[in-house]
Image (spheres, rainbow, N blue to C red):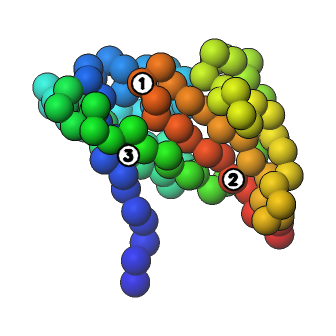
């Protein structure tokens, strides 16, 4: 049984990744070394890795499914409106039925929050 997919996200500097995941999204640092941090919130986790070489090669789009999209939008838009993605800056019903909004940080990492209809 597969339980969880945990992405590894590369940043030029560790503080850039921690800004997005910890300061903006409220993740906790579960483990930290000089160039690696494991962050988590609720059931979501990510590896934040400092690697200038890979940061320029890989700017991912990560989707996080939720059942509280309006609460998450309120939290992020109040705390950090600067990271709302210009193409999807508010909760919007998409043609495939999901409610979504997106973030885009200064480094080009995109996070899409998605709530499927129940």
Q: Earlier in the sequence, mark 1 or mark 2?
A: 1
Question: Mark 3 or mark 1, which is nearer to you?
Answer: 1
Structural distance between the alpha carbons of marks 2 and 3? 17 Å
Instruction: Please indicate, yes or no, whether residue 73 appears anywhere in the rendered image.
Output: no
Residue 56 vertical position relative to residue 16 in the rendered view, above or below: below
Q: Earlier in the sequence, mark 2 or mark 3?
A: 3
x and y percentages locating residue 67 in the rendered image? 73, 55
Q: Which residue is mark 3?
A: 46
Q: Which mark is residue 107?
A: 1
Q: Residues within 10 Å of mark 3 (few under 14, many from 20)?
A: some
Q: Which mark is residue 33?
A: none
Identify the secondary structure beneath mark 2.
Answer: strand
x and y percentages locating residue 101 in the rendered image? 72, 41
Do the CB atoms of the residues marked 2 and 3 lie less than 8 Å apart? no
Residue 14 vertical position relative to residue 69 in the rendered view, above or below: above
* Left or right side of 100 for 21: left
x and y percentages locating residue 46 in the rendered image? 37, 45
Structural distance between the alpha carbons of marks 1 and 2? 22 Å
The quadrant in which the N terminus is found is: bottom left
Residue 92 vertical position relative to residue 76 in the rendered view, above or below: below
Q: Which residue is mark 2?
A: 114
Residue 13 vertical position relative to residue 53 in the rendered view, above or below: above
Instruction: Please tell me which residue is depicted at 43% across the width and 72% down the height of the picture.
Output: 3
* Left or right side of 115 for 93: right
Nearer to me, 23 or 56 = 56
Extreme residue toward the front, this view: 57
């Amino acid at each position: 049984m597969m339980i969880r997919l945990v992405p590894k996200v590369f940043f030029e500097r560790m503080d850039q990744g921690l800004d997005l995941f910890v300061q903006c999204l409220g993740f906790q640092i579960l483990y930290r070394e000089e160039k690696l941090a494991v962050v988590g919130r609720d059931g979501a986790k990510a590896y934040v890795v400092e690697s200038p070489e890979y940061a320029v090669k890989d700017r991912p789009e990560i989707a996080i499914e939720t059942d509280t999209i309006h609460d998450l939008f309120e939290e992020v838009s109040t705390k950090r409106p600067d990271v709302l993605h210009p193409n999807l800056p508010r909760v919007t019903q998409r043609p495939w039925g999901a409610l979504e909004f997106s973030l885009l940080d200064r480094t080009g990492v995109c996070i899409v929050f998605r709530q499927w209809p129940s």
